[in-house]
Image (cartoon, rainbow, N blue to C red):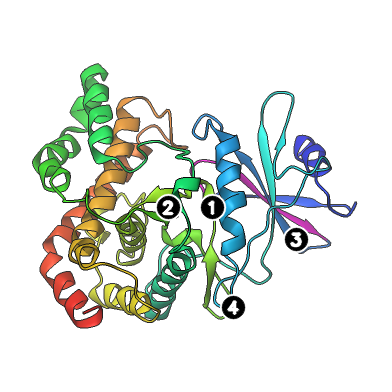
Amino acid sequence: MEHVKDIINKFQIPIKKYSYEPISNGLINDTYLVSSDRNPLYILQKINTEVFQNTEALFQNLDLVLPSLDASNYQKVELLATNTGKNYYKTASKEVWRLMTYIKDSQVFNTTENVNIAFEAGKIITNFHSLLVDFDIHLLADTLPNFHNLQFRHEQFLTALKNAKTEKIKEAKKAIRFVEENITVFLEMPMDNLPVRVCHNDTKLNNILFSKHNKALCLIDLDTLMRGSFLYDFGDAARTIVNTASEDEINLGKINFKPELFEALLSGLASQEQFLTMQEKKLLPLSVALMPFLHGIRALTDFLENNKYYKVKYVNQNLDRCKSLFAFSKKALENRTFMQNCIRQILG
């Protein structure tokens, strides 16, 4: 931890004896909880610059948007300045670090069976979008071009498949077939005329911060904050809330679609002022299947390319991820009529 101790001294914070606890929820960045006398104070992160290559644009987006994300119904998150006044620190070896305020008594959930948590998740996502509904999207840079562009991800997959070893193709045979059988459904989604909004673009449940009383406070891990479709944020939230199994669940029999959790998520969405267009509402059910499919094809591509993108604890973890994600995508497709009826009743 000596290197981390050196990094913390580059920021404008009181000189104290700090302790550092790695947080392992994220698949991309290295994250540490910084405490003093067992009192959590900050979140320190090393940005994965292999993934986020344009860090200047990333922090510029944050500078522009964070001031708007401060309201009575939305907890403010602050980036702390370095000794030179910047909102991130770059080392001589080009590591990029940031320090953020820690929100006292906060918690995250990877999955839930609690309808109140699902409701609160829907509510905070709506709050986030409501606060940014009038933001000038043209000010934002695309820090990860084509991040949720399925056509682009499909082309990456086809290239990986062409270059993959025969053994890997054989292991991933069922997953590859699922892509081939379902890609057309998602590529034909009429996305072109949807409003372009400021989106979080990674609204899985553990990127929502909750109070100790299970009240949703704000969205965290804002590196993917850029332009996008509301469908991305809704579908990503649903895939990790409506399914109570983990993303890495190996037993596909545990993958499920909980109707009561979907209804609660949607009710949370409807509890705030509405900004969605009719076309967005119509496509919400398919977005719940789209996002696990998109994440699944990315995990499958990474598996075929020998795990270049996501952190893995064992060789086939990306393959297990994609199987789990595809299993939920299939469940969501099977529940489209149910979701459509819920949307008519709850959102109108």
Tag shown at residue 72 = 4
In depth, the one of 174 and 267 nearer the eye is 267
Region in magenta: 26-36
Instruction: Locate the C terminus by quadrant.
Output: bottom left
How many other residues sit within 10 Å of disc 1, few (<14), some (14-19) or many (≥20)?
Answer: some
Give the quadrant of the N terminus.
Answer: top right
Dominant secondary structure of the residues highlighted in magenta in the image: strand
| 3D distance between C-alphas at marks 2 and 4 | 23 Å
**Residue at which label 3 appears:** 41
| Residue beneath the point at 30% across and 67% down | 242
The answer to whether 176 is drawn above or below residue 291 in the figure is: above
Residue 213 seen from this side:
yes
Amino acid type indicated by mark 4: Ser
- The reply to whether the C-beta atoms of the residues labelled 3 and 1 are less than 8 Å apart is no
Q: Which mark is residue 202?
A: 2
Q: Earlier in the sequence, mark 2 or mark 1?
A: 2
The reply to whether dot 4 and dot 1 touch (C-beta < 8 Å) is no
Say whether marks 2 and 1 touch (CB < 8 Å): yes
Residue corresponding to mark 1: 221
Q: Secondary structure at mark 3?
A: strand
